[in-house]
Image (spheres, rainbow, N blue to C red):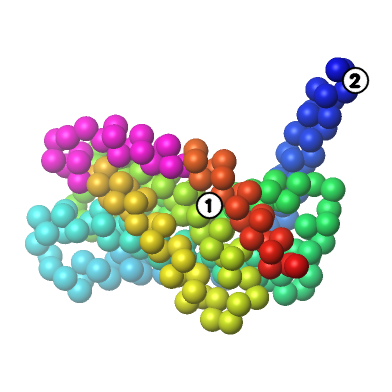
Amino acid sequence: MSGARPQDADGERDGALAGLAWALARDLRIALRTRSELAVIVAFYAVVVTLFPLATTPDRNTLLTLGPGVLWVSALLASLLSLPRLFAADFADGTLEQMALSPWPLPAIVSGKIAAHWLTTGLPVVLLAPLAALPYGLDGDAIGVLGASLALGTPILSLLGAIGAALTLGVRGAGGLLALLVLPLYVPVLIFGAGAVDAFRAGLGVDANLSLLGAGLIAAAVGAPFAAAAAVRIALD
């Protein structure tokens, strides 16, 4: 009996990793087949960050002050724009129910779907950030801090957004309700993410802001897949 427990634990871990890898690969393949949807999200982010300086003022100091907040709000909205497709299509055609009935743990499958969401929406935002920051006059070091804050913060947006997307499955007006659910959860991420760049520009340390984002990422990575999986099961019942 004592020797069976490690084997069971290894089997559960291998099953969880297999479920995560399967869901990640599947959603990435689907995303590559619907590249136009991904292009719309990336274009939305690029257009917002590009048009904002044209609609406000060319003053360098003003743009330096507003830049981190605008870039972070644009990243937040781009993530929010793509959240409905996280579970909705699979829920509509019955695939999500088959996932819930599979031998793999549902939280692992949800984790794979969240990872695919970040890779197709959050990662492009992180990669575009240095270019998007140029119109705001941020220097190289400030852009580095911005990139670090986005790299830590955008996965949190996907993780928390997955909970809201699961809670609104099958609900009328799910898009508006989803925004109402997740936007309050996004506020701390927005504050610490943009605040890291502001702290750097003010000559203060950025460790506190980045550490809080890192702690938030760990907490969200541990808890969000289980919460989203529980919400998915409720929607399927």
Rendered position, 204 above or below 22: above
Whether the residues at callouts 1 and 2 have beta carbons within 8 Å, the answer is: no
Q: Is the residue marked by circle 2 packed among few (<14), some (14-19), or many (20+) residues within 10 Å?
A: few
Q: Quadrant of the N terminus?
A: top right
Q: Secondary structure at mark 1?
A: helix
Cα distance, mark 1 to mark 2? 38 Å
Q: Amino acid at mark 2?
A: Met
Residue that numbered label 1 is attached to = 159
45 in magenta: no
**Spot occupied by residue 220 in the image (x, y as percentages of width and height):** 51, 45
Q: What range of the chain is rendered magenta?
A: 198-217
Rendered position, 194 above or below 210: below
At 36% from the left and 38% from the top, the residue drawn is 212
- Residue 218 seen by the camera: yes
**Spot occupied by residue 216 in the image (x, y as percentages of width and height):** 43, 42
Q: Earlier in the sequence, mark 1 or mark 2?
A: 2
Q: Nearer the viewer, residue 68 or 221?
A: 221
